[in-house]
Image (cartoon, rainbow, N blue to C red):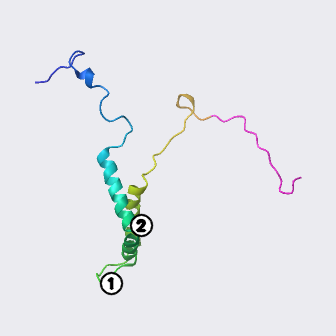
Amino acid sequence: MNKVRNENSGFEAQKGRGRPKGTPNRATTEFRDTIKALLEGNKENVSIWLQSVADGDEKHQRKPDPYRALDILAKLAEYAAPKLSRTEVTGQDGGPVEVSGINIKLVRPDGA
């Protein structure tokens, strides 16, 4: 049975509550902070581990795999520095960007 919400149902009283738009989720933030702390606490070890993957490890019969080492590094980097989103710049009403009135003054190194 579906409840129909009308203006008097109390739903309006709940409107606007919760996490403000753009505020990161607390669990996600804590997870990223934990990963970042783990990486910072193991700087020397992470470097050794990545080098081991890139160079291979005869003792454990692992072949050299520099591509995998870079892939691991890229995945770890996402926790320290989030990916930048793509931004598209458009002009008025989605049209092309218009540029006008650019003044360029050229100065010669010899001052002439």
Q: Position of residue 32 (x, y in %)?
A: 35, 54
In the rendered view, would you say 84 is above or below 46?
above
Q: Position of residue 77 (x, y in %)?
A: 41, 59
Disc 2 is placed on an element classified as helix
User: Which residue lies at the image location 76% right of the left edge and 43% below the top edge?
Assistant: 104
In this view, the residue in front, 25 or 66, is: 25
Give the crowd class for mark 1: few <14, some 14-19, many >=20 residues within 10 Å: few
Q: Residue furthest left?
A: 1
Q: Decide which of tag 2 and tag 1 comes sooner along the chain.
A: 1
Q: Quadrant of the N terminus?
A: top left
Q: Are marks 2 and 1 in contact (CB under 8 Å)?
A: no
The amino acid pointed to by label 2 is: Leu
- As drawn, is 32 to the left or to the right of 103? left
In the rendered view, would you say 80 is above or below 92?
below
Q: Position of residue 91 (x, y in %)?
A: 57, 32
In this view, the residue in front, 93 or 77, is: 77
Q: Residue furthest right?
A: 112
User: Which residue lies at the image location 38% right of the left edge and 61% below the top edge?
Assistant: 76
Disc assigned to residue 70: 2
In this view, the residue in front, 26 or 100, is: 26
Q: Position of residue 96 (x, y in %)?
A: 58, 34
Magenta-drawn stretch contains 107: yes
Residue 11, quarter of the rendered image: top left
Magenta-drawn stretch contains 109: yes
The amino acid pointed to by label 1 is: Glu
In this view, the residue in front, 102 or 38, is: 38
In the rendered view, would you say 32 is above or below 16?
below
Residue 72, quarter of the rendered image: bottom left
Reading the image, the residue beneath label 1 is 58
Give the crowd class for mark 2: few <14, some 14-19, many >=20 residues within 10 Å: some
Residue range corresponding to the magenta coloring: 98-112
- As drawn, is 95 to the left or to the right of 1? right
